[in-house]
Image (cartoon, rainbow, N blue to C red):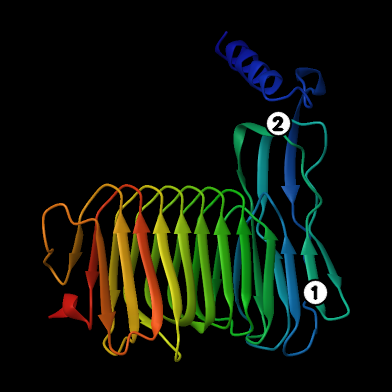
Amino acid sequence: MLVAAELAVVSLAIWSLGGRTTFAAGLHPVEFRATTIAPLAAGVTPAVVIDDPRSRVRVGESDDGLVHVADLTQMRGAIFSSARYSQLRVTRTADGVRIERPDPPRIQIDLFGFSTQAIEVNVPQGAHVEIVRCSGADVTGIVGGVSVRSQDGHVSLARLDGNVDARSDDGYVEARDVRGDRLAMTSMDGHLSLQDVAVGSLLATTHDGRIEANGLSLRGERPDATLRTDEGSIRLDLLPGANVTVSASTADGRIVVDGSSDRADASQRTIQLGTGAGKLTVGTADGSIHIFTNGASLQ
């Protein structure tokens, strides 16, 4: 009776989510085994494009100058599905490598088993990596530039040098030890974390979540940076030597600079650091802002 009840619930859930996959598709066993993919030679600065909307993607540096792709996906049990799960497709392009998985069924429910959907890609350090779609990503040790779009899952960036653009539709975004001309971080639903970031242009925005930037350094003669959240607090820790004018505002909260505020209800502040040549805009619609200048949080 319990099994029958579970099947009835699953059938109802599938029907309610659009009806493209129905109970009539049948419950059948599955045991997905990923094929082995041989390393590819694509030069020292290849353009590597990854498109796998259902998998978490891990990207790191290869130690032999080749592009290595490993499909870590595992599925075992019984599922309702109108189509089989696809193997990764890896092709050599004119300027690099394309890694993609044809879209799996819109609805897939695993029963009496388990599934892990992930891929690992190791590339030459100078590669430019573009993750078109994924369910979360971890990118480490790349200097040729990175672009990430996660439909569902957090994005983690570490030890990068170059232009970086990362977005998560549902999940937090974190950047550690990132250097470059430009860094853009966006989350539709999740917090943003920056640690030891040094860039000339910074855009960090989230619709729902706090922002924490520790050890931030804005480089160049006229750096331009924006940290903004629709709902959440902001903590900004600037390293010594900043030459920016900080414009901070909150619709509901306080602005505290180096541990003190002008008054209890202060909602707007302008602070000049150094020559004030650069521009740093900090804003939240709901939350307090804490700003530490010249490494004040370490004192």
Query: Residue furthest toward the top?
Result: 1
Q: Nearer the viewer, residue 271 or 201?
A: 271
Q: In the figure, is residue 263 to the left or right of 54? A: left
Q: Residues within 10 Å of mark 1 (few under 14, many from 20)?
A: many
| Quadrant including the C terminus | bottom left
> Quick check: 273 left or right of 85?
left
Q: At which x and y percent is residue 92?
A: 86, 75
Compared across the picture, whether 69 is left or right of 181 comes to right
The secondary structure type at the circle numbered 1 is strand
Residue that numbered label 1 is attached to: 97
Q: Position of residue 137 (x, y in %)?
A: 57, 61
Looking at the rendering, which quadrant does residue 293 occupy?
bottom left
Residue lying at the far right of the rendered structure:
94
Q: Amino acid at mark 1?
A: Val
The amino acid marked with disc number 2 is: Ile
| Residue 283 marker | none
Give me the C-alpha separation between circle 2 and circle 1.
32 Å
Quadrant the N terminus occupies: top right
The residue identified by callout 2 is: 79
Foreground tag (2 vs 1): 1
| Residue drawn at point x = 82 percent, y = 31 percent | 82
Q: Residue at x 41, y 59 (%)?
A: 228
**Which is more N-terminal, label 1 or label 2?**
2
